[in-house]
């Protein structure tokens, strides 16, 4: 069987990371975050990609598709070799745009099945406030007001069309993510109970 993949999409601060780690606790899914993998790679001193990732992040641009997909593939392969939750992956924050979706299809078509897309739907205002709050402890240099205005625009312009595209295929499961963590998780759980 091919690995089964769920993409978790939504704006910065929608709760992708939070909800995905809860799903991974309750269901046999391995949680991978494209953003976390890129940040981890950027911080590795022996990485051939760290400078490229750093300069993309500093300019507020997406990392090159090839790098992101290489990191995702590597993480998936390592899990499939050694992990317990071998064939179910929850990929958070990916694909962030058309280019990344095309790259995924080129490399992963026939090698992994996208079961559905979990869309954490959250107002821009709530997203910004959550990230500003997160910025007090996250150490992330993009959790500030100026970067967030830009990230929200980037999300609306590039990730929303990906969600719409999957919507047309009947693959999107939308949850109202503006509510409390537990209220959101109750709805997320019912999605995974039904079809996870
Ligand atoms: N439902 C929620 N209500 C309030 N705060 C939340 C909720 N979900 C997540 N948070 C907090 O908001 C911030 C952003 O959540 P995170 O999961 O990192 O979002 P994303 O990965 O989508 O950017 C974090 O500080 C997190 O603790
Ligand atoms: O496939 C991806 C996913 C993320 N990013 C970059 O990583 C940043 C942080 O993404 P993450 O998902 O961690 O942000 P969050 O939504 O959690 O705030 C984004 O702004 C993008 O610039 C990227 O280049 N490619
Ligand atoms: Mg995140």
Image: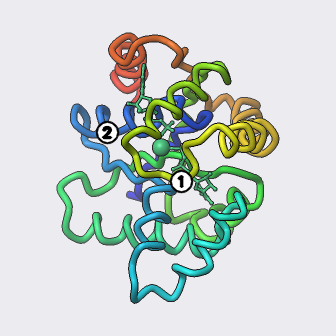
**Mark found first going from the N terminus, 2 or 1:** 2
In the image, residue 116 sits, relative to residue 181, either above or below, namely below
> Element at badge 1?
loop
In the image, residue 121 sits, relative to residue 115, either above or below, namely above
> Element at badge 2?
helix
Question: Residue 141, which numbered label?
Answer: 1
Given residues 59 and 89, the one toward you in this image is 59
In the image, is 97 to the left or to the right of 37? Answer: right
Rendering quarter of residue 58: bottom right
Give me the C-alpha separation between circle 2 and circle 1: 22 Å
The residue at the point 58 percent across, 74 percent down is 67
Rendering quarter of residue 61: bottom right
The residue at the point 60 percent across, 29 percent down is 128
Q: Can you tell which of label 2 and label 1 is closer to the viewer? A: 1
- The quadrant of the image that shows the N terminus is bottom left
Type of colouring: rainbow
Given residues 24 and 142, the one toward you in this image is 142
How many other residues sit within 10 Å of disc 1, few (<14), some (14-19) or many (≥20)? few
In the image, is 113 to the left or to the right of 28? Answer: right
Residue 166: % across, % down = 69, 37
Given residues 18 and 105, the one toward you in this image is 18
In the image, residue 175 sits, relative to residue 38, either above or below, namely above
Given residues 151 and 10, the one toward you in this image is 151
- The quadrant of the image that shows the C terminus is top left
Residue 49: % across, % down = 54, 82
Residue 121: % across, % down = 60, 22
Residue 14: % across, % down = 53, 29
The residue at the point 62 percent across, 79 percent down is 52
In the image, is 57 to the left or to the right of 1? Answer: right
How many other residues sit within 10 Å of disc 2, few (<14), some (14-19) or many (≥20)? some
Would you name the residue on which mark 2 appears?
21
């Amino acid at each position: 069987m091919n690995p089964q993949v769920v993409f978790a999409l939504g704006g910065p601060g929608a709760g992708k990371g939070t909800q995905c780690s809860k799903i991974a606790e309750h269901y046999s899914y391995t949680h991978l975050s494209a953003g976390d993998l890129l940040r981890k790679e950027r911080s590795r001193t022996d990485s051939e990609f760290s400078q490229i990732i750093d300069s993309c992040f500093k300019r507020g641009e997406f990392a090159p598709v090839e790098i992101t997909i290489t990191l995702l593939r590597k993480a998936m392969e390592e899990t499939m070799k050694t992990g317990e939750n071998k064939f179910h992956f929850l990929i958070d924050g990916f694909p962030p745009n058309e280019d990344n979706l095309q790259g995924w299809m080129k490399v992963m078509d026939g090698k992994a099945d996208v079961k559905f897309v979990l869309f954490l739907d959250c107002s821009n205002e709530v997203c910004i406030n959550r990230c500003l709050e997160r910025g007090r402890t996250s150490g992330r240099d993009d959790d500030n007001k100026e970067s967030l205005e830009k990230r929200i625009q980037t999300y609306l312009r590039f990730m929303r069309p990906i969600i719409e595209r999957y919507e047309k295929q009947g693959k999107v499961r939308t949850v109202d993510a503006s509510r409390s963590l537990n209220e959101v998780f109750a709805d997320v759980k019912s999605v995974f109970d039904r079809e996870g």
